[in-house]
Image (cartoon, rainbow, N blue to C red):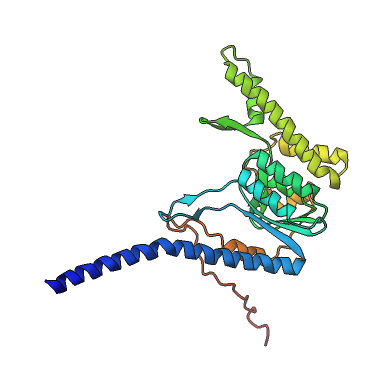
Amino acid sequence: MAILDNFNINITDILWILVFISFFIPVIQKRILLSKRQLIMRSIETKRNSRVISMIHRQEIMSFFGFPLARYIDIEDSEAILRAIRMTPPDMQIDLILHTPGGLVLAAEQIACALKRHKGKVTVFIPHYAMSGGSLIAMAADEIVMDPNAVLGPVDPQLGGPQGYYPAVSILKALEQPNPHRDDQTLILGDVAKKAIDQVYEAVYFLLLEHNTPEKASELARMLSEGRWTHDYPIDFEQAKELGLPVNDQMLMEVYELMELYQQSGMRRPSVEFIPIPYVPHAPPGKGK
């Protein structure tokens, strides 16, 4: 009987130990991941004599229960980036690694204006995409480094509420149609839409004016803020170059390595799989002999 009691106690102890370990493993893994990210960022800083800031929004499993969290540009992001800029000497270069679907206009504009006021050179690295507010931030840079397959996006404002979000320009288009039964809320939304488009235009114009003539800056600002394209329209590297944005494709390998450390959610089977090693091309038959 005593042996059985000891056995039950041991099993209970083992279960508690397993629960304790399972609780702390995610914390330890997160710290290891953070250390790896910081090592790569420090490597870039040493190579380029710059302050490296990353704003990378991907789904990550951050909690004990494994729920993925989708991230967007918010006030916490702007507070953190503004703090990093304040801690950077005025003449030191800033390298911002940007990967985001967009977010709050207020936060994105705060970040963009702070980068524009920084005296040192500002370079934005876009390994995959920087849409909406991310594109607004990129326009504050002296140099935009894009992967050849990366994309930017239009910055036309989106308005709405619980029922969904709509392009501000589409709200104005709808108001042009005669409708005697239109309610006051729709009219108010139209007024806000007009103001939002004007405000975003002014912000983009200010950001582009340093490297463009007033006429060119106005043309680009109008094109990007007026709703010429759908909000998810991809502005690729070649089109960004044609628009006159200061882009090049000299991406750092360390940026790709950093992106590998921001894993996507593991809640489902990955839809894309490959052997994660670089392949060396073979010489065609008959050559190299």
Query: Does residue 153 show up?
Result: no
x 80%, y 59%: residue: 92
| Near-viewer residue (247 or 71) | 71
Within the image, what quadrant is residue 123 found in? bottom right
Q: Is residue 251 visible?
A: yes
Q: Which image quadrant is residue 48 in?
A: bottom right
In the current view of this chain or complex, which residue is farthest to the right?
213
Counting labels gives 0
Image check: 66 left or right of 113? left
- Quadrant the C terminus occupies: bottom right
Quarter occupied by residue 24 = bottom left
Q: Is residue 272 left or right of residue 15?
A: right
Q: Residue furthest front?
A: 2
Residue 55 appears left or right of 207: left
**In front here: 223 or 202?**
202
**Residue most toward the bottom?**
289
Q: Is residue 287 above or below residue 195?
A: below
Relative to the observer, which residue lies in front, 257 or 170? 257
Place of residue 88 in the rendered image (x, y in percent of width and height, measured from the top left):
75, 57
Q: Specify the quadrant that holds the N terminus.
A: bottom left
Q: Is residue 252 above or below residue 139?
A: below
Q: Position of residue 198 (x, y in %)?
A: 74, 30
- Quick one: which residue is furthest to the top in this view? 180
Residue 280: give x, y in percent of width and height. 62, 76
- Residue at 85% across, 47% down: 211
Q: Is residue 112 above or below residue 160?
A: below
Task: Pinpoint residue 116: horizontal percent, then vertical percent.
Answer: 79, 47
**Residue 289 left/right relative to 31:** right
